[in-house]
Image: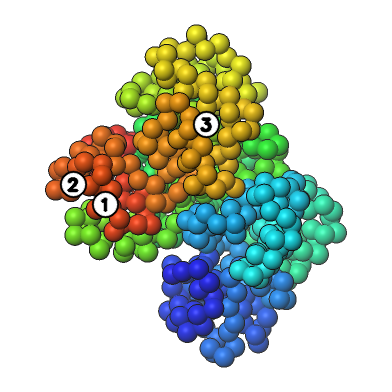
């Protein structure tokens, strides 16, 4: 699967005829006779090939006058893997749109964050996705509106504004145009089992992914490194607090064979789209595991590891600045010691929740709060204290930006220029905060130990040379190599 797959008509037709769910989100099938668009795995009888046309996005289908299929619900497909594996302008723009920037700051805000003119961004998005930023954001608003209509008893007026629409009329018109049903008809048709209790601000939904998904290292890593007060593993679920644009939230995530169950408690429903986007990103749910694993299997050393437990994801983060701070706290100390350092920061400088849930009591401290603390209060060596204070100062004043819009190469260079930032710290931030799928950790002790046991070169330079064959998926190779050890990060908690 590759960039611009929708232009390969023969391949798209084969995917539709075989109802291959791996291609959901990569492209959309529009049927000329019915004016409906579907995901490739739609369960209905496939149309004749001459009646199919293909688009790279749901927004492009809607722009061309097609409405969403009521059977396969293409708006609920996993997102395209491309936006999380590429670092070019289009991918960075799509990550920002998913994070709700167009709804909050408009297209000028999107352009400002990317450092390009609005015209350049419009032109590139239209060329690759068949729709500009406003149309892409509109499609996302429609999807959010449908979710709220079908899973909450909220009045339609509240749903309209929570989904990001500027008026009730625009909300009604968009829902009718995209789904060929009025908002009230959508609610009537919704399966009753999808309804949730009417607790204000609480939503229950399913996060789709491309199979296979191995939850062991994904949730195991998040649970083993959980910071008390901010994160916990309880009753088979990973739970954490979220700092969001309009307020705070608490999310509960439970792995299931065919989806991730997600329960969100939000202080402001306008944060729904952002919260979903960040949780999907943290769990790496838009990855294409088949393509990744097939590439890694070409190495005879990795092949048995992949075959034993395919579908490993890279555990990422909901807050890039938070992760960078935690990476510094974890330099040259154990997982338990890093958690202890982070918990002290949370207690002393975190933002207490007005409505805590159990042991989830705080938001992780903001860079601004950490920049204001007394460095002498930090129980760490002087050199690491300097690393910490320099990092939080640059995060606080904006001179260092780790957001989804960042250029990976430029951000790496900025991180390497900071005192106390060596290759390991930079690469672990690149892998888990920036989301670079090719980040690699040849100096990591766990990786070197695994390499030695597997007969791979164990020196960083030689291992890096061998790992060239794993590109562009070296971050996933790291997960398979780590999994050879008995460390708690590799196992779902009992």
| Colour mapping used in the image | rainbow
Which residue is at a point 53% across and 65% down the rendered structure image?
25
Give the quarter of the image for residue 34: bottom right
Give the quarter of the image for residue 147: bottom right
Give the quarter of the image for residue 149: bottom right
| Residue of label 2 | 457
Residue 349 at least partly seen: yes
Residue 205 locus on image (x, y percent): 56, 50
Q: Report how far apart the C-alphas of labels 1 and 2 lie in the structure.
A: 9 Å
Question: How would you rate the neighbour count of disc 1 (Cα within 10 Å): few for under 14, some for 14-19, many for 20 or more?
Answer: few
Which residue is at a point 68% across and 53% down the rendered structure image?
116
Q: Nearer the viewer, residue 42 or 474?
A: 474
Can you say which quadrant of the picture contains the N terminus?
bottom left
- Label 1 element class: helix
| Residue of label 3 | 322
Which residue is at a point 36% across and 60% down the rendered structure image?
292
Q: Report how far apart the C-alphas of labels 1 and 3 lie in the structure.
A: 32 Å
Question: How would you rate the neighbour count of disc 3 (Cα within 10 Å): few for under 14, some for 14-19, many for 20 or more?
Answer: some
Q: Earlier in the sequence, mark 2 or mark 3?
A: 3
Is residue 207 shown above or below 270?
Answer: below
Determine which of the numbered discs, if any, sits on residue 193 in the image.
Answer: none
- Label 2 element class: loop
Q: Earlier in the sequence, mark 1 or mark 2?
A: 2
Q: Nearer the viewer, residue 312 or 456?
A: 456
Which residue is at a point 57% across and 91% down the rendered structure image?
50
| Residue of label 1 | 465
Residue 206 locus on image (x, y percent): 53, 52
Can you say which quadrant of the picture contains the C terminus?
top left
- Label 3 element class: helix
Q: Report how far apart the C-alphas of labels 2 and 3 lie in the structure.
A: 33 Å
- Marks 1,2: beta carbons within 8 A: yes
Q: Earlier in the sequence, mark 1 or mark 3?
A: 3
């Amino acid at each position: 699967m590759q960039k611009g797959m929708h232009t390969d008509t023969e391949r798209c037709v084969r995917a539709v005829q075989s109802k291959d769910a791996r291609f959901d989100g990569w492209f959309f099938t529009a049927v000329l006779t019915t004016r409906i668009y579907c995901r490739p795995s739609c369960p209905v009888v496939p149309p004749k090939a001459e009646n199919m046309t293909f688009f790279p996005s749901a927004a492009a289908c809607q722009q061309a006058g097609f409405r969403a299929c009521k059977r396969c619900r293409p708006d609920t497909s996993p997102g395209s893997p491309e936006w999380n594996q590429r670092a070019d302008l289009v991918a960075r723009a799509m990550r920002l749109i998913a994070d709700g920037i167009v709804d909050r700051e408009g297209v000028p805000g999107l352009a400002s964050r990317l450092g390009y003119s609005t015209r350049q961004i419009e032109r590139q998005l239209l060329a690759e996705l068949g729709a500009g930023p406003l149309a892409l954001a509109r499609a996302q608003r429609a999807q959010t509106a449908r979710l709220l209509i079908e899973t909450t008893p909220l009045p339609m007026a509240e749903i309209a504004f929570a989904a990001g629409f500027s008026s009730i009329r625009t909300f009604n018109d968009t829902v009718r145009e995209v789904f060929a049903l009025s908002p009230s008809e959508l609610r009537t048709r919704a399966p009753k089992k999808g309804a949730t209790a009417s607790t204000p601000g609480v939503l229950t939904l399913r996060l789709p992914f491309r199979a296979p998904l191995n939850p062991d290292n994904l949730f195991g890593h998040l649970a083993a490194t959980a910071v008390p007060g901010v994160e916990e593993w309880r009753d088979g679920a990973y739970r954490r607090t979220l700092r969001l644009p309009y307020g705070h939230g608490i999310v509960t995530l439970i792995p299931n064979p065919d989806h991730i169950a997600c329960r969100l408690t939000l202080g402001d429903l306008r944060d729904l789209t952002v919260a979903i986007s960040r949780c999907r990103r943290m769990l790496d749910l838009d990855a294409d595991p088949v393509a990744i694993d097939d590439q890694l299997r070409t190495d005879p050393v990795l092949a048995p590891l992949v075959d034993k437990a395919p579908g490993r994801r890279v555990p990422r983060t909901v807050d890039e600045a938070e992760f960078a701070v935690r990476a510094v706290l974890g330099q040259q100390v154990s997982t338990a010691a890093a958690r202890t350092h982070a918990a002290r920061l949370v207690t002393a400088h975190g933002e207490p929740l007005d409505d805590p849930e159990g042991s989830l009591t705080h938001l992780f401290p903001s860079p601004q709060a950490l920049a204001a603390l007394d460095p002498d209060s930090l129980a760490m060596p002087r050199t690491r204290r300097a690393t910490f204070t320099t990092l939080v100062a640059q995060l606080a004043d904006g001179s260092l930006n780790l957001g989804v819009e960042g250029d990976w190469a430029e951000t790496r260079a900025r991180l390497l220029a900071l005192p106390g930032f060596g290759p390991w710290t930079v690469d672990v931030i690149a892998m888990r905060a920036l989301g670079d799928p090719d980040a690699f950790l040849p100096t990591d002790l766990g990786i070197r130990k695994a390499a030695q046991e597997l007969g791979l070169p164990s020196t960083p330079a030689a291992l890096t040379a061998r790992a060239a064959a794993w590109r562009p998926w070296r971050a996933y190779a790291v997960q398979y190599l780590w999994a050879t050890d008995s460390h708690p990060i590799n196992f779902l908690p009992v």
